[in-house]
Amino acid sequence: MNPEILFEDNHLLIINKKAGELAQGDETGDIPLIDSLKDYIKKRDHKPGNVFLGLVHRLDRPTSGVLIFAKTSKALTRMNEMFQKRNIDKIYRAIVQSKPPKNFERLEHYLKKNPKNNKTTVYSKPTADAKKAILEYTYLGALDSFHCVEVKLFTGRSHQIRAQLSSIGCPIKGDLKYGAKRSNPDGSICLHAHRITFEHPVKKEEMTIIAPVPKDAIWQATTKF
């Protein structure tokens, strides 16, 4: 394993997750990143015992970008609290099929996930068992047949960005589950956790971590924005 490490100290390990990598174990039985990274740290640092590593938040398997792990239980507890209190700014980039209706918009919906098909349904009004979801998108520009938007998340619902953008007629490139016309050759979707800002759980300093976009041509075209 050769992870793209964006930041590391005694408390945190932050990587740029590749699309297709599994953050934590699921029904597929594939080896998750958390296990691979524990093994990587054990070998790199010649640790004789078990390595502690806690997953702070999640990214969908076909999504790339910033992913934070805690290297101590104290850091994990404090980071979890920050996420629960939404004291973290999360900025994503998405490549979508259609130009959004506005250059900037705040979307507020109610989302309900169906565990049977692992798909989230979007409602415009409060609905039983649905959770409020809020994001803001900013249109960045055109990319030949596609368009690039920046998304700021205010809630962390399952498939939130994918479902909400699809609901306004802007499915993410490659995301067949939410209305894309065709899949990407590598099975990814064009959603990237680009930037995250938070207070270091121990040093109490503000940190901003930026994950470079994937190296393929369409993603590289977004770097002009």
Image (spheres, grey):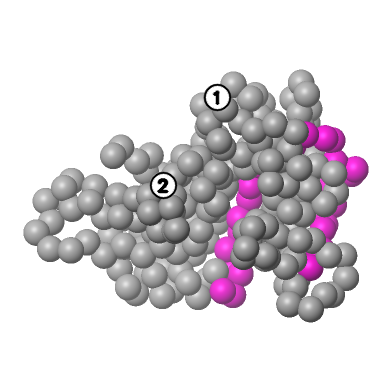
Viewer can see residue 200: no
Start and end of the magenta stretch?
84-110
* Residue 22, placed above or below residue 123: above
Residue found farthest to the right: 101
Q: Position of residue 64 (x, y in %)?
A: 53, 43
Distance between the Cα atoms at labels 1 and 2?
A: 19 Å
Instruction: In the rendered view, tell whether residue 96 sits above or below residue 106.
Output: above
Decide if residue 216 is on the left or right side of residue 92. left
Depth check, mark 1 against mark 2: the one in front is 1
Residue 11: give x, y in percent of width and height: 32, 62
Question: Badge 2: how crowded within 10 Å, few (<14), some, or many (20+)?
Answer: many
* Few, some or many residues within 10 Å of mark 1 (<14, 14–19, 20+): few
Q: Is residue 113 magenta?
A: no
The residue at which mark 1 appears reads as 216
| Left or right for 177, reference 142 | left
Q: Which quadrant of the structure image shows residue 220?
A: top right
Labels 1 and 2: the sequence-earlier one: 2
Observer-nearest of 175 and 211 = 175
Kindly indicate the quadrant of the structure image that contains residue 145.
top right
Numbered badge on residue 185? none
Query: In this figure, which residue is indicated by the disc labeled 2?
Result: 15
- In the image, what residue type sits under mark 2? Ile
Amino acid type indicated by mark 1: Asp
Residue 92: say if magenta: yes
* Secondary structure of residue under mark 2: strand
